[in-house]
Amino acid sequence: MNIQLFLYLFTLGSVVSSLLTEALKKAFNAIPTNIIAFVNACVVGILGTIAAYILMGIAFTLANIVCILLMTICIWIGSMIGYDKVIQTISQVKG
């Protein structure tokens, strides 16, 4: 994965994940928004990156599989929209 592909997938994935997170927050009021953002980012990040790899003919090497997982984490953090959600997640993990 080169930097251009990373930035493209990160930007597109974060936007899609943010929009889906906002829509799902309205439907599921009882679930914390950072958990919704995480699950949503996993789906968007993993499936989006795999789809891009397939469409571009990129081989699934160990390095590219690690990039898929790292892309998911980047999209999750990018889609949480704000520092307060990151702090909320850290406090939930600690507690």
Image (cartoon, helix red, strand yellow):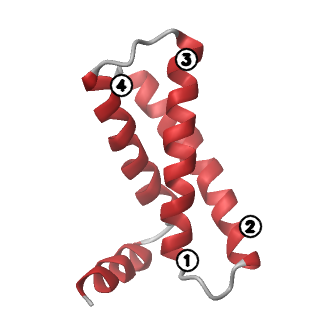
The percent coordinates of residue 3 (x first, y second) are 36, 25
Amino acid on which the number 2 mark rests in the picture? Ala
Residue pointed to by mark 3? 54
Circle number at residue 3: 4
Asked which secondary structure carries label 1, the reply is helix
Give the distance between the C-alpha atoms of the residues marked 1 and 2, in whole angstroms: 11 Å
Per the image, label 3 sits on a secondary structure element best described as helix
Judged by depth in the image, the label closer to the viewer, 3 or 4, is: 3
Q: Are marks 1 and 4 in contact (CB under 8 Å)?
A: no
3 or 1: mark nearer the eye? 3
Tell me the residue at 65%/49% (across/down).
Answer: 16
Nearer the N terminus, badge 3 or badge 4?
4
Mark 1 or mark 2: whose residue is earlier in sequence? 2
Image quadrant in which the C terminus is located: bottom left
Residue located 49% across and 72% down the image: 35
Real-space Cα separation, disc 3 to disc 2, in angstroms? 28 Å
In the image, what residue type sits under mark 3?
Ile
Which tag, 3 or 2, sits closer to the chain's start?
A: 2
Q: At 23% from the left edge and 85% from the top edge, which residue is drawn?
A: 94
Q: Amino acid at mark 4?
A: Ile
Query: Which residue matches tag 2?
Result: 23
- Quadrant of residue 20 within the rendered picture: bottom right
Packing grade of label 2 (10 A; few <14, some 14-19, many >=20) is: few
**Which residue is the site of mark 1?**
33
Q: Quote the CA–CA distance across marks 2 and 4.
A: 30 Å
Q: Secondary structure at mark 4?
A: helix
The reply, left or right, for residue 25 in relation to residue 58 is right
